[in-house]
Amino acid sequence: MDKNHFHLIIIGSGPAGCTAAIYAARANLNFAMITGLEPGGQLIKTPTIANWPGEPEEIAGALLMEKMMDQARNLGAAILSDNIETVDLAKRPFSLKGNKAEYTCDALIIATGASAKFLGLPSEKKYIGKGVSTCAICDGFFYKNKEVVVVGGGNTTAEEALYMAKIAKLVTIVHRRDTMRAEEGLVVQLQKTPNIKLELNCNIVEILGDDRGVTGARIKNVNTNATQDIVCQAVFIAIGHKPNTEIFSKQLEMEHNYIKIGYGAATATSVSGVFAAGDVVAKNYHQAVVAAGLGCTATLDAKAFLAVLNLK
Ligand SMILES: Cc1cc2nc3c(=O)[nH]c(=O)nc-3n(C[C@H](O)[C@H](O)[C@H](O)COP(=O)(O)OP(=O)(O)OC[C@H]3O[C@@H](n4cnc5c(N)ncnc54)[C@H](O)[C@@H]3O)c2cc1C
């Protein structure tokens, strides 16, 4: 058999991909998991997770994901470091083209998760890596005792702002609506934190800077159109995520860019033999435990599919 052919390929190594791999290894399937550019997925950016069942003490996201990857590896999973650029799902075996190699498989689990959204401002692009960031946990360290802006109104925004409040002198949250959308508990924490300030009903219209990087943010009030410049050395964009589904979009049925599932089996997509799990399908349930549960379900579904083909 071609060394790059597997009965099952799992794309993605977040909670969904790793759980799918653990179950595939336990089922003794011939399979590989392809990690993508972010081995461990989104959780590696999270300093503490308090809602992972079985971890009564908080656990660092990076540690949790290291444990999941180790568990899959120890059970015999082939973990391949590659990023898939194109897929052909028109016929079986399915073909995947990565940066490093080409692969084929009889069944596929898509667990490519989600990516941070940007505002779409030209000045934002200009200062990426020079003060514009989508990850406070990754880059916050560089802004000790500085003034920073966090953009958005949801849970991610609140978490990023609370994280930065422990490092920076002042954190200004800029949000386009009149109230935060984050969970009540997080909003209370924001209100109780003295170095967090809210600029509501405002959009960022330009990120200001010089050769060395970000120096400020120009904000515009959505009601009055008045503009104001905020002095800051970093802008953290925390406006949510979009599912990583572009490479599948013309080949699978989608809904708002999320992969539609439930075609017969729970995680089956509109193409027979292709399954999807995690943030790529769970539009309103972006949680690690949901992703892990769907990863398990996807392997059980893929295993049943392969059994009909007399493959395992
Ligand atoms: C800051 C932050 C804090 C969070 N805190 C919590 C929390 O406390 N509790 C909780 O339950 N959830 C939390 N979440 C949500 C949780 O991280 C996600 O719900 C979960 O990671 C989704 O898992 P996933 O496996 O579907 O996708 P992801 O974790 O997004 O993983 C996707 C994987 O796919 C890979 N990939 C993508 N494209 C390709 C490609 N083309 N080829 C190959 N591989 C590819 C990536 O490299 C990555 O390994 C948090 C998220 C963030 C951003």
Image (cartoon, rainbow, N blue to C red):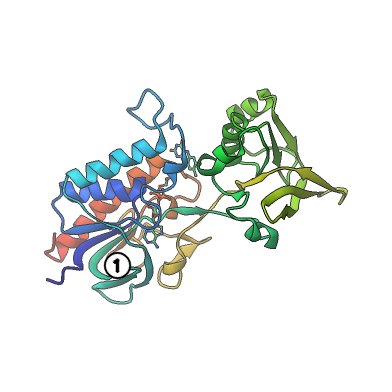
Count the marks: 1
Residue 160 sits in quarter: top right
Residue 224 appears in the figure: yes
Q: Position of residue 137 (x, y in %)?
A: 51, 39
Residue depicted at 43% across the width and 53% down the height: 113
103 vs 188: above or below:
below
Q: Position of residue 255 (x, y in %)?
A: 50, 61
> Which quadrant of the figure contains the N terminus?
bottom left
Residue 201 sits in quarter: top right
Q: Is mark 1 within 8 Å of ligand 1?
A: no
User: Which residue is situated farthest in the bottom direction here?
Assistant: 91
Q: Position of residue 38 (x, y in %)?
A: 40, 52
Residue depicted at 46% across the width and 59% down the height: 244
Residue depicted at 62% across the width and 26% down the height: 189
Residue depicted at 61% across the width and 38% down the height: 143
304 vs 289: above or below:
below
Residue closest to the eye, 9 or 128: 128
9 vs 157: above or below:
below
Q: Is residue 118 left or right of residue 197?
A: left
Q: According to the image, label 1 marks what residue?
A: 272
Q: Amino acid at mark 1?
A: Ser
Residue closest to the eye, 218 or 264: 218
Label 1 secondary element: loop
How packed mark 1 is, by other alpha carbons closer than 10 Å (few <14, some 14-19, many 20 or more), is some
Residue 68 sits in quarter: top left
> Which quadrant of the figure contains the C terminus?
bottom left
Q: Is residue 135 left or right of residue 103?
A: right
User: Which residue is situated farthest in the front direction here?
Assistant: 211
Residue 281 appears in the figure: no
Q: Position of residue 43 (x, y in %)?
A: 43, 42
